[in-house]
Amino acid sequence: MVRLMSHNKMSYLIPWWDDYVDLNYDFIDDEPTDGIKVTAHQIYDDPPYDGILVSKAKIEENKKNLRRIKKTGIHKYLEFEGPVFGDCGAYGYIKEDVPPYKTEEIGEYYHDLGFDYGVSVDHLIVKQFEEQKHKRYEITMKNAERFLDVHHSRGYEYIPVGAAQGWDTTSYKASVRELLDMGYQYIAIGGLTRSPTSTVLDVLRAIQEVLSNKEEIGVHLFGVARLSAIKEMHKLGITSFDSASHLRRAWLGAKSNYMLPDGKNYAAIRIPQTDRSPKARKILNSGRIEPEELEAMEEGCMGLMRMYERNKADIDEVLEAIVWYDSIIDAKKSHADEYLKTLKDRPWELCDCAICRDVGVEVIIFRGNNRNRRRGFHNTWVFYNQLQRILEEEDTIKQTTLKDFR
């Protein structure tokens, strides 16, 4: 049974990178418990995404997982009932002269593992390999043509998706036109992940000239999820897109690790584990501080954060302790201003999502996978709900306009 995405609703897909947490993690002792691992759609009653994007290059990194997926199928492995979108993971072989996968192999792979959508083998066109752009374009187009032939001749049930690559509006437009002429009903636009929003929208406007009056065509946009551009993307015919940026921001950067539905962002408070943090180990190896002293600082900061949550610790006392510990672990930059804002606003108490209700202040502490990735799941949940509000507003405006027109 193929699980389809609606062309009438813009669908958000989360890229799959083995994003698991320990369901019953012991936050007090920082120890795993019964080993039950879950991901975002198993924590929230409703998944904070419409589908999952799984790249072949990614799942092949873990041979044990790959064997399990081959045995159970992709849906059973993910424990996910929604659409699963497969691609080759072109960024994984971006430096190669040619992709490492053959079209026949990929066509069979999508079928055998039970994907709902499968993307043809493409080759990224980027400035780093400017001199290869025409060659990579031709590789992408020839693979797409062969992919559709293989899909039809072998009677595969998944939806074939033609990959479009380019280096400017003209080449992207030509790529999409070729894919439509081949007979594709679903097209995926690649290579724009690192482009400015203005460039992305320019490309989509050019493509829309080819897609106009073709409402039955689905268009996926790889790696772009910018709320400021969602309305325009929707108007320009994008039916699905993927991005893990809101998940990853939970542990990347120092100022916007935790999102709230009202658009405010907060820094997570860094209290690394002295026995697991590379920076902590480096400090200890330098001999500048004794292990027992650093451990005492760490435990003191964790205790103060929990006391602060219960309103039993003064904000100045907590801030002084965590800034001091932070300065020893990472002396390059002070995060005092960001931490003060986080402590004053207590954002973890302003969110009623399943994770924030369950773990409280632990979600705002920058410390290990079980806190950081949970914060990423929370961010994904916030983003998805923001997206739904934007799309609902667009639908309301559209319905009102149609009503007035009639």
Image (cartoon, rainbow, N blue to C red):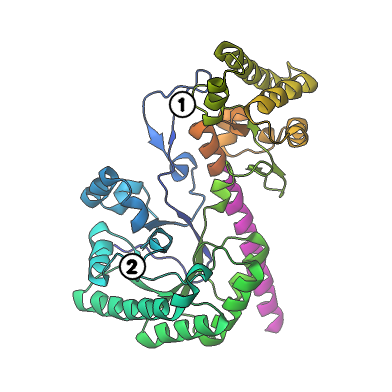
Secondary structure, magenta segment, majority class: helix
Q: Decide which of 323, 350 is in the foreground and name it.
A: 323
User: Which residue is at a point 48% across and 73% down the rendered structure image?
Assistant: 219
Please state if 67 lies on the left or on the right of 300 as rendered. Answer: left
Q: Residue 268: within the magenta?
A: no
Mark nearer the N terminus (2 vs 1)? 1
The residue labelled by disc 2 is 99
- Marks 2/1: CA–CA distance: 41 Å
Query: Is 397 in the magenta?
Result: yes
User: Mark on residue 306?
Assistant: none
Span of residues in magenta: 378-406
Tell me the element at label 1. Answer: loop
Q: Is residue 213 visible?
A: no
Label 1 crowd (10 A; few <14 / some 14-19 / many >=20)? some
In this picture, is 355 found above or below 152? above
Q: Quadrant of the C terminus?
A: bottom right
Q: Amino acid at mark 2?
A: Pro
Q: Residue at x 44, y 69 (%)?
A: 124
| Image spot of residue 102 (x, y percent) | 26, 69
Residue tagged 1: 25
Q: Are marks 2 and 1 in contact (CB under 8 Å)?
A: no
